[in-house]
Image (tube, rainbow, N blue to C red):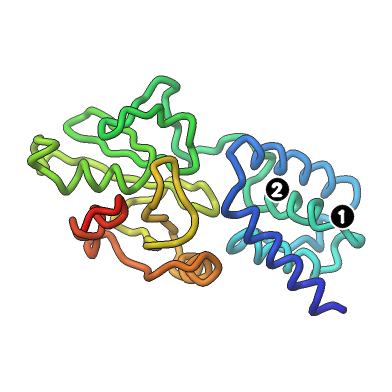
Amino acid sequence: MRVVTFLVILLTASLFAGNISHAKMLKLSKKGAKISETLCSKERLPKPFGNIREMMIRIKESGACPPLSNSKLEAVAYYLIKGSGETTAKEMTVPEHAKCPVCGMFVGKYPKWAAQMVIDGKTYYFDGVKDMMKFYIFDADFPYDRSQIERMRVTDFYTLESIPAKEAFYVLGSNVYGPMGNELIPFKKLKDAENFMNDHKGKKVVRFDEIEPDMILALDGIS
């Protein structure tokens, strides 16, 4: 029975990880805070680690809370990883009217996918790693002095933390789509990238310097 329950948790968490919106994440974090304060032993709750799926299992195993439904367990996991649900300094703050210079989409509508480049003091926002890499790689389409790039950051898919683009691990070819379709999905930790790849039929994990023009074109169905 315990094995079956854990399988249900794993499947549920995988579905939520791929489809949850930023607004729902905030709502879940606040709900988790309330559940933790009223039903759980704070001293026994596990410390934040890994992704939501892993946290749900660790909370259940800790015995810090009475038996919780999967939805309540998920809410507590989000609270432990994300805090009360308010935006933290680690998250990327996107101006309301910022538009992606590649596709023209309003980036603030999709904060979990946001990427950023700072070039000669000017900040550009993108609605996904794919468009950021187009802006970075295709110099004929987007002419600017690449030596003036000061910073490139992407958003960890699980934690929503803003992380250096050149240090991230990217999953290529999964069944999870961003605002512009097929995406390179970034993670701070290799283990999270590998778990996501296995859960969502990804083809492989690549580093920043391994991303080639052909990969970017293939994401748009161009061979």
Residue ID for mark 2: 79
Mark 2 vs mark 1: which is more N-terminal? Answer: 1
Find numbered disc 2 in the image and state the secondary structure of the residue it sits on: helix
- Residue 155 on image: x %, y %: 43, 47
Confirm or deny contact between disc 2 and disc 1 (CB under 8 A): no
Judge left or right: residue 78 versus residue 155.
right
Q: Nearer the viewer, residue 204 or 42?
A: 204
Q: Position of residue 103 (x, y in %)?
A: 30, 33
Look at 92% across and 60% down and name the residue there. Answer: 66
Q: State whether residue 157 is above or below residue 28.
A: below
Q: Badge 1 is on which residue?
A: 40
Amino acid type of the residue tagged 1 in the rendering = Cys
Quadrant location of the C terminus in the rendered image: bottom left
Which x, y percent locates residue 105? 37, 29
Above or below — where is 109 with respect to 85?
A: above
User: Is residue 174 placed above or below 34 in the rendered structure?
Assistant: below
- Asked whether 112 or 199 is in front, the reply is 199
Mark 1 is surrounded, within 10 Å at the Cα level, by few (under 14), some (14 to 19) or many (20 or more) other residues, namely some
- Graded by Cα atoms within 10 Å as few (under 14), some (14 to 19) or many (20 or more), the crowding at tag 2 reads many
x, y percentage for residue 60? 80, 67
Q: Residue at x 49, y 52 (%)?
A: 157
Q: How many marks?
A: 2
Taking the image as shown, residue 67 lies to the left or right of residue 24, namely right
